[in-house]
Image: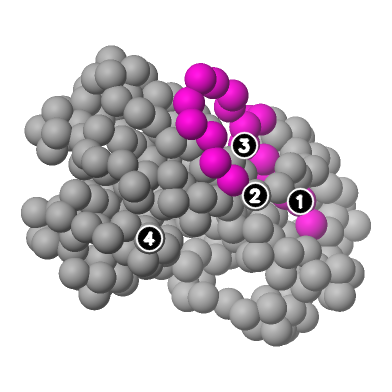
Amino acid sequence: MAVPRVLVFGGTTEGREIAEWLSSRGGCEVFISSLTEFGSSLVQGLENVTSLTGRLLPDDIEGLLRDQSFSSVVDATHPYAAGVSASIAGAAEACGVKLYRVLREDEPQGPWNGVDSPQEAARSIAGRPGNVLLTTGSKDLPIYAEAIGDFTERVYARILPVASSLEAASELGLPVNHIIAMKGPFSKELNCALIRDLNIDILVTKASGTAGGFWEKVDAARECGIELVVIHRPTKEDGLTMDQLKETLDRTLAFEAEAQG
């Protein structure tokens, strides 16, 4: 007897939690699509979970949905991956597959320097002195390299310890001792240690929420007395909380299993 198949997008904390829950629940086949090998490694060893690794274009996503007969798709990508979410939504609609978007908590608000984009963040710090700690990943590093004249001298980048991220930082001329290749989220204590050891004056982060270790950065910046620049999320989305998603999927998968039985 065939069982329902669920496709989860996102090498994120939420993606891993959903995959773990579906694996322990049983009664379905789970595929999780991640951009990097690192994202795939988060779900290694889970029963009835298959990892798909690599960048998928919109046509690739639609082809995957049509070829593999998925009954449900879960978008658990990062809040800042708006383009990917739009591609997933378009493919799910074209294929008539149920789509669920899992959301992090509402964007945090606080007494920090809020900006609307990496470009605005780069401009806001370009003309000011002091060392900068970027904790926004490797994808946007070229934006800061272009805007900050002494980028290689005073910018430190905390990125994932994967080849593509390391290559991106190196190609921009960042010295090895300005590249911090570590997997987060990080404690307040570790953030404080980096800030003090590197003599950081400005910390740049996305408003990623609890799952991304956001509040630990806030607390560290406050304790160390440095400026915090926070990049707002690109859009306000509709979707489900993690608990709502699990409850909805539980009902949906039970119904599908009964119908196929």
Residue under pointer 3: 104
* C-alpha gap between disc 3 and disc 1: 13 Å
Q: Secondary structure at mark 2?
A: loop
Look at label 2 and name its amino acid.
Answer: Pro
Specify start and end residues of the magenta stretch as a single range.
99-116
Residue nearest the observer in this picture, 257 or 244: 244
Element under label 3?
loop
Which of marks 3 and 4 precedes in the sequence? 3
Q: Which mark is residue 147?
A: 4
How far apart in space, not on screen, are marks 4 and 3 (Cα)?
Answer: 31 Å
Q: Badge 1 is on which residue? A: 100
Q: Residue at x 33, y 37 (%)?
A: 203
Residue visible at 74% across and 79% down?
A: 62
Colouring scheme, one of rainbow, by chain, secondary structure, one colour: one colour
Image position of 258 (left or right of 210): right
Residue type pointed to by label 4: Ala
Residue type marked 1: Tyr
* Callout 3–callout 1 Cβ contact below 8 Å: no
Q: Position of residue 94 (x, y in %)?
A: 86, 75
Kindly indicate the quadrant of the structure image that contains residue 221. Answer: top left
C-alpha gap between disc 2 and disc 3: 14 Å
Does 70 appear above or below 131? below
Find residue 37 and report its horizontal and vertical position in percent: 37, 67
Q: How many marks?
A: 4
Say whether marks 2 and 3 touch (CB < 8 Å).
no
